[in-house]
Image (cartoon, rainbow, N blue to C red):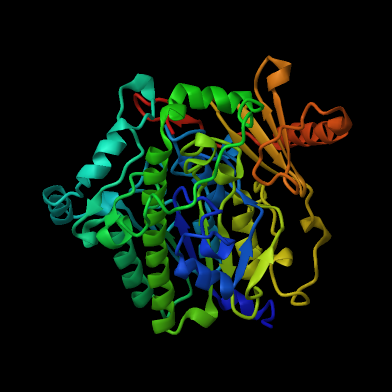
Amino acid sequence: MTSAAARNNWNILVITSDEHNAKIMGCANHPIIRTPGLDRLASEGTLFTKAYCAYPICAPTRQSFITGQYPLEHGQLSNAHVFDKRTLTWAHHFKQHGYTTACIGKMHTNHESYEYGYDYRYSTEHFTEDIKARRASDPPQFDPDDKLIFDAMTDIRAGGKQPSRLHGKVVKDESLETDAIMLKEAVQYLTAHQSQKFFLHVSFVQPHWYWNTNKQFYYMYDPANIDFPESVPGELESNAVVYKMAEQAGWFQNTEKMNRLARARYYGSISWMDHNVNQLLDTLDALKLTENTLVVYFSDHGDMAGEKGLWLKNQMYDSSARIPLIMRMPGVVPAGKVNETLINHVDLFPTLAGLTSALEHLPTTLSGNDLSGSVIISGSRNEDPHEERKFTFSMQGLHSVDSVPMQVMARSERWKFIQYNLEAPEQRYVLYDMNNDPDETHNLAYKDSLQLVVAEHLQAINGFLRGLRKPVYKVKLKKDANVMQV
């Protein structure tokens, strides 16, 4: 067991992916997927099964975990908004505690070349002209048979003027892919800074569409033999907002064959991302850094991946709003444990600070809590009663800092409650019993015997929204941006 005083000498390696469904990992008991890297990390650390994103869209939720604030507070309300360069992040904080800091990969701030407090920043904006030229001369190629199916798939967006996002290609030169470049840069960074106390965030873009991988991973899963969750008749009709969205997107027009192909290629992308995670773990081993490095893996949000006939994110279903989260800290975080603490993106900043005894100077503007007492081996610190929580929240659909979110989720230990910003009372509320209906098929919000549960969660949402602070800096959109882009 490591003392609190000794924990201030730990390195921190944060590994993030993009759009990874938390159900689709070997360590989450998925029957098909091969994720030896994440399984290894979970066996040597703790897997969290009730971790949720702050906002199931890339840019807003990414800035939530680096600030410890919800989007209505930090100001990046959508993928089309700009994250203000002056905003304080976890990089500023950990620098105060003697860390050299770096972010390698996607931040999705719409200022990708800016540092945001990091000592070192590397993104696609830093690619050399040689890399750009080589990527352009040798792009990934469609499998001809797959292309016929992908081209027939329906994914209507922006008035139907843009092609479907649901496809993948075969990569000929893996070294030219973004994640491979970021992995190489991260390994070089770890090697160069192995004698320093570092905070490194490595941000992979897979398994976000498009699912471009080399042959090994592209063809790893046979569409005919993968698992495919069957829809329960009437389940979406009881969640009218989602049903309408799916109709508008045209997803109900896609056949099972189409969905199976897309799901198989999504799985291949997950396995390639996992391979890159494993490479980072191997690098820590080779540099003899494993025993003094806190490793945290999570995603920005999930992907419906064909479940209920739906794709992508935006929804409060667990496949979209729940995130995979694994922490490894030998001797501090228990190995091989499953942790059911309710935890959110906004909690990660203060929790990492708590795990590494870096709570001094923690910003007072955080909405997240230090949950390290619920994470570490029992007895290695006193439990803080303030760490107990009844709810965690997620939101989606913001146009301005004065707007009411289109949807807000309150997740308690047993229940998931969703409030939609609609006038029609019979469509405003959704309640799922996550203990007895983990697949979220039966809306119980209008059941007479559960009105006290509905009222409790409504009260929690109202208190949550009232407690949010206004952004410090003016909220801005990108030029010619579409605020509803996802």
Of 132 and 23, nearer the camera is: 23
User: From what the image shows, is residue 337 above or below residue 455?
Assistant: below
Q: How many marks?
A: 0
Up/down of 485 relative to 393, above or below: above
Q: Quadrant of the C terminus?
A: top left
Quick one: 379 or 342, which is closer to the camera?
342
Q: Quadrant of the N terminus?
A: bottom right
**Residue furthest to the top:** 423
- As drawn, 360 above or below 439: below
Say which residue appears at 52% left-offset and 64% top-offset.
26
Q: Position of residue 483 (x, y in %)?
A: 45, 26
Q: Position of residue 169 (x, y in %)?
A: 26, 48
Seen in the picture, residue 172 relative to 196 is either above or below; the reply is: above
Quarter residue 144 falls in: top left
Say which quarter of the image contains residue 419.
Answer: top right
> Would residue 474 be visible to someone looking at this image?
yes
Q: Residue at x 49, y 23 (%)?
A: 247
Q: At 79% across and 26% down in the image, what residue appears?
A: 446
Residue drawn at (32%, 41%), measured in percent from left and top? 167
* The one of 142 and 37 positioned closer to us in this rendering: 142
On the picture, is 96 further left or further right than 413?
left
Q: Position of residue 177 (x, y in %)?
A: 26, 56
Instruction: Left or right? Give the position of 48 relative to 267.
Output: right
Residue 179 location, quadrant: bottom left
Whole-percent x and y of residue 230?
A: 55, 41
